[in-house]
Image (spheres, rainbow, N blue to C red):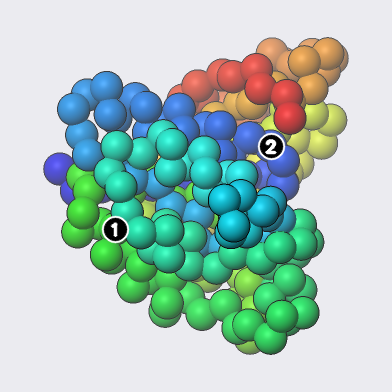
Amino acid sequence: MKHAFFITGTDTNVGKTYVACKLMQQYISQGYKVVGMKPVAAGSDFVDGKWVNDDVLKLEAASNVKAPRELVNPYSFKEAIAPHIAAEKVGVDIEISVIKQAFDALASMADIVIVEGAGGFLVPLNTHQQSVADLAAALNIPIILVVGMKLGCINHSLLTLEAIQARKLILHGWVANKIAPDMAFCDENIATITQKLRMDCLANYVYSL
């Protein structure tokens, strides 16, 4: 089995990494070789003499395939700001072709590749007006949408769906992540999103960041 999923979110800090790791654990429990990928990461800590992003460390820990970090995370920036701004500040141009090559290399090493995007679906990546959506289109793999359950999540979900459909990409499913555990009428919001997206919720987590 050779397969991959692109994990995107309705916003930043909605639990994409958490959901990606959960999905990886599920496939590993079924006996597959699984590797995680974070093509672009902004916001790093100094660990063992190197600047590394916490999401990348979590994906590496969840993987049962050990891959070079330059493949798992081709672009990493120190400051936790929008990727295209972080890249421009250090004179780097994020190239989708470089990410695609890294993805292909990972796909040759594992049965399953779980790719986590940066921020939301339309976050810019470079000065060429390319975004996370363009990266998803280049990889051309099914998308899983992580919905941060908070006020406004219905609108954010539907806008993301429109952006995905506009690029003729496949929304494989969506995950409800209760980042605001005290959200009023959360179950009703989940029911509405299920109806509007026309697909059942794959999983329902409570993970507050």
Which of the two discs, 2 and 1, sits closer to the camera?
A: 1
Is 195 situated above or below 17? above
The kind of residue tagged 2 is: Val
Give percent across and percent down for residue 143.
45, 48
Discs 2, 1 touching: Cβ within 8 Å: no
Residue hosting label 1:
106
Going by the image, does 159 lie left or right of 110? Answer: right
Q: Residue at x 30, y 47 (%)?
A: 66
- In the picture shown, does residue 185 fall above or below 104? above
Name the side, left or right, on which 53 lies relative to 185. Answer: left
Q: Secondary structure at mark 1?
A: helix
Q: If you read the primary sequence from the N terminus, does the residue marked by circle 2 or circle 1 appear first?
A: 2
- According to the picture, the residue beneath numbered tag 2 turns out to be 14
Residue 62 placement, left or right of 57: left
The quarter of the image holding the N terminus is top left
| Residue at 68% across, 76% down | 87
Which secondary structure, mark 2? loop
Instruction: Give whichever of 68, 183 is nearer the camera.
Output: 68
Mark-to-mark CA distance, 2 and 1 = 25 Å
Which image quarter is the C terminus in? top right
Q: Say if residue 170 shows up in the picture.
A: no
